[in-house]
């Protein structure tokens, strides 16, 4: 039995379509105005400068925004992009332009595990502030009190075993005591390499052709949180 659960967001607690068809287009549209309004604030500038440096020293914010929009189109999980997206989405949640999608089986399971005393953690490519906004404005209400901690790519990439080792250390448990839930086989592979237990979440809505047999790399598979046994 796990002593803690670590969960991914996109494709796991929530639909890929909400992220790709609602959140990403919103950020793409809102970025130019957001950068024009806030680009001189140190917390924003830091990430814009990181993008500029990584792209040969871009000197105009409009060019940096274009790079960021290209990364959104490619679904790059870049820490700077994710931090800036989180800042932009804050306006969207505040204005109730959208609320975060949660699968109907996910919220009850998270509540039940929390009520049973299992600490819950998030590990997503979305920045920690974006994760808090997401679960704070979900279709199932404010779920943030259920979580004991939040991790993003500042811990390392989600396909690298070292990230899961660092997360286990930060949680204060052996990796073997943590169950990681994700929709991405390579993420589950990395978590298993670090010693965590894994369940591959294979939702029909997100993966119309469920991964089976060899494609699951031997991970336990569930089509929803109601099938996850803890
Ligand atoms: C929590 S913010 C929206 C999700 C996001 O930006 C993203 O890239 C999701 O990636 P995940 O690691 O949760 O699959
Ligand atoms: Mg995912």
Image (tube, helix red, strand yellow):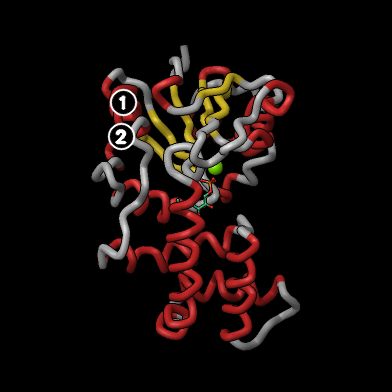
Q: Is residue 117 above or below residue 18?
A: above
Counting from the top left corner in percent of width and height, residue 200 is at: 57, 28
The residue lying at 49 percent from left, 40 percent from top is: 205
Mark 2 burial class by Cα count in 10 Å: few <14, some 14-19, many 20+ = some
Q: Which mark is first along the chain, 1 or 2?
A: 1
For residue 146, which numbered disc appears in the image? 2
Query: Is 84 or 92 nearer to us in this picture?
Result: 92
Residue 26 picture quarter: bottom left
- Determine whether the beta carbon of the residue marked 1 sits less than 8 angstroms from the nearest atom of ligand 1: no
Counting from the top left corner in percent of width and height, residue 69 is at: 58, 72
Is residue 129 shown to the viewer in this render?
Answer: yes
Is label 2 in a helix, a strand or a loop? helix
**Dot 1 corresponds to which residue?**
114
Counting from the top left corner in percent of width and height, residue 210 is at: 60, 31
Image position of 149 (left or right of 56): left
**Mark 2–mark 1 contact, CB under 8 Å?**
yes
Counting from the top left corner in percent of width and height, residue 48 is at: 57, 74
Query: Is 230 or 44 nearer to us in this picture?
Result: 230
The residue lying furthest to the bottom in this view is 60
The residue lying at 59 percent from left, 71 percent from top is: 68
Q: Quadrant of the C terminus?
A: top left
Is label 1 in a helix, a strand or a loop? helix
- Measure the alpha-carbon separation of dots 2 and 1: 6 Å
Image position of 66 (left or right of 40): right
């Amino acid at each position: 039995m796990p002593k803690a659960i670590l969960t991914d967001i996109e494709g796991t607690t929530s639909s890929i379509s909400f992220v790709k068809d609602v959140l990403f287009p919103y950020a793409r549209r809102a970025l130019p105005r957001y950068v024009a309004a806030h680009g001189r604030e140190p917390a924003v500038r830091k990430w814009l400068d990181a993008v500029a440096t990584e792209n040969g020293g871009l000197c105009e914010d409009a060019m940096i925004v274009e790079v960021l929009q290209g990364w959104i189109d490619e679904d790059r999980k870049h820490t700077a992009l994710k931090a800036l997206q989180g800042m932009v989405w804050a306006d969207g949640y505040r204005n109730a332009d959208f609320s975060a999608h949660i699968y109907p089986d996910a919220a009850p399971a998270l509540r039940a595990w929390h009520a049973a005393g299992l600490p819950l953690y998030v590990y997503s490519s979305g920045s920690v502030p974006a994760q808090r906004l997401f679960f704070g404005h979900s279709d199932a209400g404010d779920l943030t009190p259920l979580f004991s901690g939040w991790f993003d790519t500042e811990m390392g990439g989600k396909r690298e075993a070292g990230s899961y080792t660092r997360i286990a250390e930060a949680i204060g448990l052996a990796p073997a005591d943590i169950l990681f839930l994700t929709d991405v086989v390579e993420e589950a592979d990395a978590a298993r390499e670090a010693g965590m237990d894994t369940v591959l979440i294979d939702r029909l809505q997100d993966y119309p052709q469920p991964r089976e047999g060899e494609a699951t790399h031997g991970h336990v598979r569930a089509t929803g949180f109601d099938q996850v046994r803890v």
